[in-house]
Image (cartoon, rainbow, N blue to C red):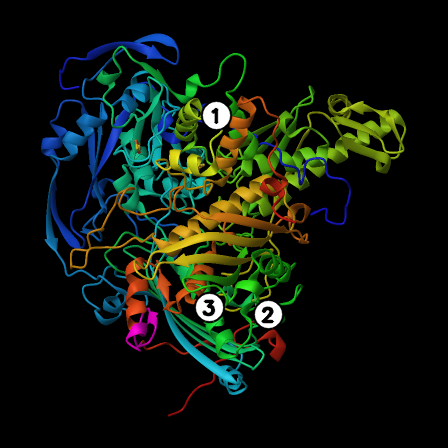
Amino acid sequence: MNGKQKAHIEFTLNGERAEVAFAPHKTLLEVLREDLSLTGTKHGCELGECGTCAVLLDGRSVLSCLVLGLDAEGRSVQTVEGLADAAGLHPLQETFADTGAAQCGYCTPGFLLVAKELLAHNDNPSREEIKEALSGNLCRCTGYIKIYEAVELAAARMRGEEMELPREAVYGLE
Amino acid sequence: MSQNSDHKNFKVVGKPFRKVDARAKCTGQTLFADDITLPRMLYCKILRSPEPHALIKSIDVSKALAVPGVYAVITGKDLPIPYGILPVSQDEHALCVDKVRFIGDPVAAVAAIDEDTAFDAMNLIEVEYERLQTITSIEEAIMVDEPRVHDYGDAGNVHKKVHLEFGDLEEGFAAADHVREDVFFYEGNTHLPMEQHAALAHFDADDKLTLWSSTQTPHYVHRALAKTLELPAAHVRVIATPNGGGFGGKSDPFNHEIVVAKLSMITRRPVKVTLTREEVFYCHRGRHPVLMKIKTGVQRDGAITAMDFETFLDGGAYGSYGVASTFYTGALQTVTYEVPRYRFKGLRAFTNKPPCGPKRGHGTPQPRFGLEIQLDKIAEDLKLDPAEMRLKHLVKPESVTANYLRIGSMGLGKCIEKVVEGSGWKRKFRKLPAGKGVGLACSSYICGAGLPIYWNNMPHSGVQLGLDRQGGVRVQCGSIDIGQGSDSVLAYVVAEVLGIDPFDIRVLTADTDLTPVDLGSYSSRVTLMTGNAAIQAAERARELLSKAVAEKLSLPEENLAFAERRVFDVENPEVGVSFAEAVVLAESRFGTIGTVGSYTPPRSPGRFKGAGVGPSPAYSYSACVAEVDVDPVTGFVMVERVWIGHDIGRSINPMLVMGQVEGGVYMGLGEALMEEMIYRANRNVVHKFPSLLEYKSPTTLEMCDVKTYLVEDADPNGPFGAKEVGQGPLLPVMPAIANAVYDAVGVRIDEVPITPEKVLAALRAKAQGKDARYGPKGVPAVDWQEPLKVLTPAEGGDGREMPRVAVHS
Ligand code: FES
Ligand code: FES
């Protein structure tokens, strides 16, 4: 640390009050992963190019590799670790698991949080709106299609509708 | 072993179960390599060469060592033993010893208390280089013998030259009604996994080394560590962490793995390295750029009479898998349509660029691209429908090709029929309005390499089962899940045989201390090989349980069925015991219940030198129709939709198969339109854009719609009949798109990526009445050695090389 003073912040992390001390130049990504041991948030570039590190800051998605840890002072941060609660997984987590939208799973936390932000504003997004909302997140495994299906399924379930994956999404066309 | 005849109602196989690790991956609980930390852990940074080709004159690490918080600095002299994935290419050093061969080659490494300190110290290392002339292209490597990038290889800067001939080519061309010669170029590209490579080493109090690493091949890393560190292999443990994407890019043993192991041995503390995205580009091992010339003779109905295939690979600075890659560019041309006579010439060049290696489809997408476009041109020459022409000349199931590949099941015909019908091909081909077009292409891929990377007679995959008296089952296997779902496949297969729930199974994989060897997650081998090994282990366990239960219930063993966590009388289902009770009975009778299973691929009929690349227990097949919209003003190609049929043999889990098909189409789309690993056009061979932003890959906005058809035609060698899907569906996408562009605007783009600039250049040429084409003009003249000649099976050959006839001048 070359003798530099640590910064200290208080904020809300996944709904709980948290405090943490860290080297002041650290990004929120680094603070979460290294100083708070929340390794669910991933990185693919640390240059703001891939969306892998997305978290919600006061409910809005941000690239945690581009936000200083200091900027979280007094604010509310949500990471993938805060999506599920004692009652169970978030509907998006359920549908990502159900559709195989997480292949290697490395991009998944970022997609989940950006999708959550989308559904908070739009409970019935069209395929085009989903594509638009997720266009800042790269996934190299899925071709995005299972991710769209997972978001659509979760949106329907959150609206209280019964919905299953179309047969062609699971078995292909006849 | 494969249980095909057993047409019972599957309980698990063919069902869209969740993956066994799905919840962990959706909650952030999966621990990837960089997520692991140990107390007292140090951080490593690797200094890389800024020179593309140079001698190392001196390295001064004293300033770095003096930085407070630095615990060790190492250079090439600390790791003098070379290594490499192939026994014939042991040409890498973990840190360069006396010479650097590309910008990014590792030169020195630091272990320090934190990453910032390691980084600062790394920048204080002083290296003096003496520049050498660079070798920047295939052509240059052929022309320029000195300086050599390596002091081994077939000539100067030519790494490898192969020449194989199957049957009498001249007779074949003489029998043709039409002969075409075309030249194609496939630009290199890279895997770009979202997870950067990371590794953590711990040399512990017992002088034993553990390495956690994001690797697709823990077994080969184990061997490389033992060799380079001079440790007994028994004292080295490699744990592959779940890969955040691999696609072939984590299949070599890597310098950073050896470096952190060495630093841990020196400092006696855990040491971790996580590559930056830029460093991942330098690791590379991605798709070889391939220049190719194809000469094909056909009869009027499109039947191929002979094919002469020439490939030139830009290998980059090291061997890697390159010798295998070279052979692969010539291996699988024969497994889709009948090719009665076939010649292959392949050359791999050493150049001063990051090394190329295996990327999804390993060495086969490039020749497939050329071949499928050439067939489209041939169909047009002959005024045949390209789909019908292909359908007429398919390779027969249960046959042997001219180059001695044994075909098992073959569902390509059905794949073509499905995509032709689904896409409305007959309505659209050559009939859509200007700017819109459809194109078709097909392909095939291996389900695992028939031979291991180093010569041995042992199984390619091993599985160990442990049955717990409470009814739990533990599956141990050396395979590593790279996102394809291999852990889940193990659980599904064992659950099917033992009649239990896949989520009752604890899957323990990819730990060289705890799991039997599986060669790794490459060559689409895992489902077939570990699947068969798991079936064998599970059937052996089932036998023990059957014996004990049969005795207890006084029933013949054949009467017992295993399903729904019970073992029961098929004729009288209420008579039976729970699975857990069955284990108790078996354990009481035989002692602790554990079984093993293993898989070795069948021997291939080829006996000539070079016959080791191409054979596989089974081949998957794919057919694809792409529909595109080409803007003649901007040259921009938009792929609207892809229809793809894939012959999977049988889906172990159709939902995961669909995901692999869609992911393959996605990656193919990227390679077709935008992905390229290229360098600035000067002698410095600087990577043009080692970043996720500038290396273009498809986002949600470019990804096309995909319509998938799964063709199930169980293969006798597959577990429950299953074949591969991880790589095959990528292959037909690029040529289908190129053929569709031609249908849309009448220009041939004979190379990838098909960028707007290339489309516009071809459109301009067309408008000027010139050749309406963009692509390479020719291939370099090469002094090929005499071919190794093999008579084809049809000519009565036995798979051996023909004796060479002495030529008198
Ligand atoms: S790590 Fe890539 S955008 Fe933050
Ligand atoms: S699931 Fe692997 S990168 Fe998205």
What amino acid is at disc 2? Glu
Query: Label 1: which residue?
Result: A123
Could you tell me if residue B98 is visible in this image?
Answer: yes
What amino acid is at disc 3? Leu
User: In this view of the protein, which residue sits in the foreground, A91 or A108?
Assistant: A91
* Quadrant of the image occupied by residue A3: top left
* Mark 2 vs ligand 2: CB below 8 Å: no
* Quadrant of the image occupied by residue B450: bottom right
Which circle, 3 or 1, is nearer the viewer?
1
Q: How crowded is mark 1: few (under 14 residues within 10 Å), some or many (20 or more)?
A: some
Q: In the rendered view, would you say A137 is above or below B191?
A: above
Task: Tell me what residue is drawn at x 52 percent, y 60 percent.
Answer: B443
Indicate yes or no whether the magenta region holds residue B777: yes
Question: In the image, which disc is placed on residue B371?
Answer: 3
* Same subunit, tags 3 and 1: no
* Quadrant of the image occupied by residue B602: bottom right
Query: Label 2: which residue?
Result: B388
Question: In the image, which disc is placed on residue B215?
Answer: none
Whole-angstrom CA distance, mark 3 to mark 1, is 48 Å
Whole-angstrom CA distance, mark 2 to mark 1, is 47 Å
> Which span is picked out in magenta?
B766-781
Q: Could you tell me which quadrant the C terminus of chain B lies in?
A: bottom left
Q: Classify the position of ligand 2 by quadrant: top left, top right, bottom left or bottom right.
A: top left
Residue A165 appears left or right of B9: left
What amino acid is at disc 1? Asp
- From the top left corner, tell me how far across and down residue B200 is, in percent: 35, 30
Which circle, 2 or 1, is nearer the viewer?
1
SS at mark 3? helix
Residue B49 appears left or right of B427: left
User: In this view of the protein, which residue sits in the foreground, B47 or B458?
Assistant: B47
User: In this view of the protein, which residue sits in the foreground, B625 or A6?
Assistant: B625
Task: Tell me what residue is drawn at x 18 percent, y 21 percent.
Answer: A25
